[in-house]
Amino acid sequence: MRKIIHLTDLHIGFNGLEARFDNIVTNISKRITPAGDYVIVITGDLVEDAKIQGSYEKASPYLDRLKANGFTVLVIPGNHDYGTGTKASREYVTKFKDCFLADFKTWDREYPKLDLIDNVAFIGLDSMEGIVNDEALSMDAKYLAQGQLGDAQLAALDRMLNSEKVQKAAYTVVYLHHHPTYSGIIGDNFKLVDGEQLMAILTAPDHKITALLFGHRHKHGKLTVTGIGRVYNGGTSTFKGNNRSPHHVIDLSEDPKCDREENFCNC
Ligand SMILES: [Fe+2]
């Protein structure tokens, strides 16, 4: 049975956060065994600013270290992975796939990205796709901060959740960068533009979602959503802006109450 460590919003390249992630990688590798039982899901904002030359190259060796130590690592992009966070460039959509998603080799490399691992269906979404594909929104700060999946990706997600291979999986985990719903913990600013459409798909009676994982708002929290066992905002795993966020360790086969909150940072 695969277990999950949820990390998010690393912002490598921002003052001091690379050293912090170095610690996190070291401590996960030391403390979590056997590594082969775990999938590490990173929900975006791996880097602080994709436009700074060498940003991706700085981040990717840490993921390689986790993989070399036996972990499976799944990532999806956040708004900072496509530019500064407030200004994006389309070129980074492909660059991100080339650098971080070497396993994303379907003929079209389109999101949602499906990974079937043991009996778990992991489905990753690109929560900037609706903006990146829409000239009218011009990828400015407001829309990037909010995020938008777009109709095409939502329709593809619905089809994927109805597919035999996903329906046959014992557990389904959906992960993305932007928060699709909100609560008192997170606040209602910057909610995904088409978050309500996403939540309607995820909570449809035929779709059994075991966990919904995301980041973006650097305030961690667990939300209650009828029909979904776990709805977790991971905050910022490298504690950007001193927003200390626990690192969630999830065993899908157990009751969500058994999920652990760890600090792999030693800080
Ligand atoms: Fe972030």
Image (spheres, rainbow, N blue to C red):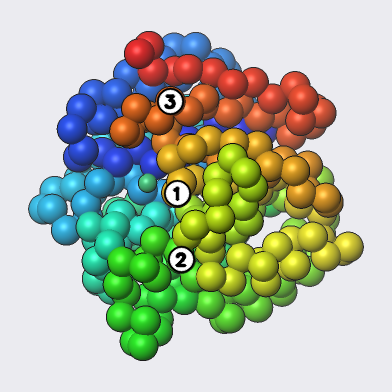
Q: Quadrant of residue 213?
A: top right
Instruction: Locate the N terminus by quadrant.
Output: top right
Estimate the x, y position of residue 201 in percent, counting from the top left. Answer: 74, 67
Q: Is mark 2 in CB contact (under 8 Å) with mark 1? A: yes
Marked residue nearer the N-terminal end (2 or 1): 2
For residue 130, the mark is none
Q: Nearer the viewer, residue 149 or 35?
A: 149
Under circle 3, the secondary element is loop
Q: Nearer the viewer, residue 146 or 259?
A: 146
Name the residue located 77 percent from the left edge and 25 percent from the top edge. Answer: 257
Instruction: Locate the C terminus by quadrant.
Output: top left
Under circle 2, the secondary element is loop
Which amino acid type is marked by label 3? Arg
Cα–Cα span, label 2 and label 1: 10 Å
93 above or below 96?
A: below
Q: How would you rate the neighbour count of disc 3 (Cα within 10 Å): few for under 14, some for 14-19, many for 20 or more? A: some
For residue 244, the mark is 3
Estimate the x, y position of residue 224 in percent, counting from the top left. Answer: 75, 43
Q: Which residue is mark 1?
A: 216
Left or right relative to 194: residue 87? left
Which amino acid type is marked by label 2? Gly
Q: How would you rate the neighbour count of disc 1 (Cα within 10 Å): few for under 14, some for 14-19, many for 20 or more? A: many
Name the residue located 83 percent from the left edge and 51 percent from the top edge. Answer: 227
Q: Is mark 3 in CB contact (under 8 Å) with mark 2? A: no
Which amino acid type is marked by label 1? His
For residue 147, the mark is 2
Q: Look at the numbered disc 1 and say if its residue's Cβ is closer than 8 Å to ligand 1.
A: yes
Name the residue located 53 percent from the left edge and 77 percent from the top edge. Answer: 150
Left or right relative to 48: residue 77? right
